Image: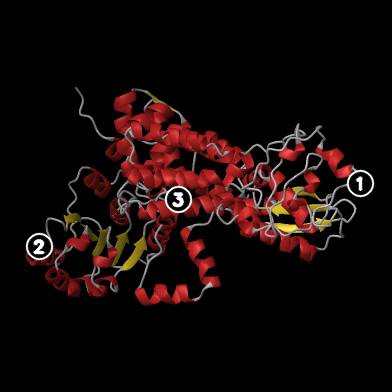
Amino acid sequence: MENYIVSARKYRPETFDTVVGQEAITTTLKNAIKSGQLTHAFLFCGPRGVGKTTCARILARTINCFNPAENMEACGVCESCESFKNNASYNIHELDAASNNGVEHIRGLIDQVRVPPQVGKYKIYIIDEVHMLSTAAFNAFLKTLEEPPAYAKFILATTEKHKILPTILSRCQIFDFKRIKIEDISNHLAKIAEKENIVAEPDALHIVAQKADGGLRDALSMFDQLVSFSGNHLTYQSVIENLNVLDYDYYFQIVDAFLKGDLPSSLRIFNEIMDRGFDGQHFIIGLGEHLRNLLICKDSQTVNLLEVGETIKAKYLQQSQACSVTFLIKALDINNQCDLNYKNANNKRLSVEIALMQIASFFLPETDVKPEPPPFIAPANPIQQSVNIPSTGEVHPRPNDTVANSPNMGGGEPRPNEDVKNPVQTTTKPKSAISLKAALEEPSKPKVEGVNITENSQELTLEDVQNAWKSYAEANSDDPAFANILQTSEVRINEQTLEVIVASHVSENMLLQKKTNLMNFLRSKLVNASLQLKTIVDEKKIQDILYTPGEKFAKLSEKNPELKRLREVLDLDIQY
């Protein structure tokens, strides 16, 4: 059996042109070699797996090459290049500072620096993980690093630049390596797959590149693992199963449920994700990333920030068209608050479910079906309609009385606790049944307290309507939800029609359900039997129904500034 070589070693770059994703640094180094302006100390810093040590080796090999090419690449065939390839070069030394971090190790290096190179122009020292050196070792290294012999070059590499002494940093030329782009990693993996005769789906390689988090070495390690799992055919499904990545499709499904106001489906999808063994915070982080991707798809200037495969990108573009920017921003805010508070939550699953319900509730009012007003059915015996007992005394309806005879339909003032919600049922039966319409249109009516509402209908003024509306709201104080709708609704008058503007379809439905009692009261109070009711839903207010705790506190503080001062004095936090 042949010795297996992992892809990270087998396909390690040997020239500047083959380094992935660090074009700015490689171009700078090649120009420095070409112009002969090489500093004596380099510091390569950046995250793991981005090419720091690789570039250090390529630089050391190139500056010692006897026959460099015109593009400043090592020839690979001269004596210096061959000795470097076989790990037999006496001019290039690598030191691992993680295991050689003492003063004695640095003193040994200083002694070696005094000896000039036997073959080649330079003696190069590559010190990896240089931040692991002790303070005493750094101090011992300072003088040599500041004034080395002309033939000595030092290349330091580290993942934690902040741990290096400022005196060392000031003596080095610093190169900051960046994380490699997902697209660059994906393209590099595709080239390797082609060389290895492996069929790989582009979306599968994008998942590997995303999981690598900018490190090419990590991507190559995962690539080898996936090949061992799937053989010579890498599919999107096999990659997400092996790497335990949550499928994009779950996020597309749950956002579709949000847009439909389908709260049960969003909870069912989350339950399915939990059953697959994924952590709640892992899901909420992924959902935030998904919402962010939808938001950047809303503008052609930011769509290039989307780092996914072409197939997934098409799905994002399609779903983003159905999402408003307002919805995405508010959903991101709720998602972010859930992420911040997840670790401190006692019931973590409930914390995520509450966030999902809050996001889905943005569209709940729009999905409520507006019921048709129930048709009016004239009672067989109008005398049995509810009547209020006025404060002046008891009214005994006569057999020929109609609804218009009731004190509530006259000019009498109803008592707050004796409105239409607490009717007094009469047991006197009339001689014949009369419809409500006929009762209102009858030219000759018996009068209650000397008032006939049909013959004496008064002109409506907005002030009178608002006062009557306010009175009815106060009379229904024992029903807080309905009273709140009455108090927050805007009332306008258009000839004989009351136009009531409500904030949602839910409020409209509740108002319509109690329309009969409301209109009886208003017609009596305003002495106008022709009064009609029309409800209007203000669509602009629907998006403002839900408030986050922070928004609630801000609005309450506007009404009562003392709340803000109380929070500052007691050093309180808003409970989410």
The amino acid type found where label 2 is placed reads: His
The amino acid type found where label 3 is placed reads: Asn
Which residue corresponds to the image point at 17% horizontal and 70% vertical from the top-left? 138
Left or right of 450 on screen, residue 295: left
Left or right of 495 on screen, residue 113: left
Depth check, mark 1 against mark 3: the one in front is 1
Q: Is residue 302 visible?
A: no
Residue 326 in percent (x, y) is at: 60, 53
Q: How many marks?
A: 3
Q: Is residue 267 visible?
A: yes
Q: Which residue is mark 3?
A: 335
Who is closer to the viewer here, 336 or 460?
Answer: 460
- Callout 2 secondary element: helix
Left or right of 412 on screen, residue 183: left
Q: Which residue is mark 1?
A: 444
**Colour pattern of the rendering:** secondary structure
Q: Is residue 346 above or below residue 170?
A: above
Residue 375 in percent (x, y) is at: 75, 34
Badge 1 local density, few (<14 within 10 Å), some, or many (20+)? few
CA–CA distance in space, label 2 to label 1: 118 Å
Badge 2 local density, few (<14 within 10 Å), some, or many (20+)? some
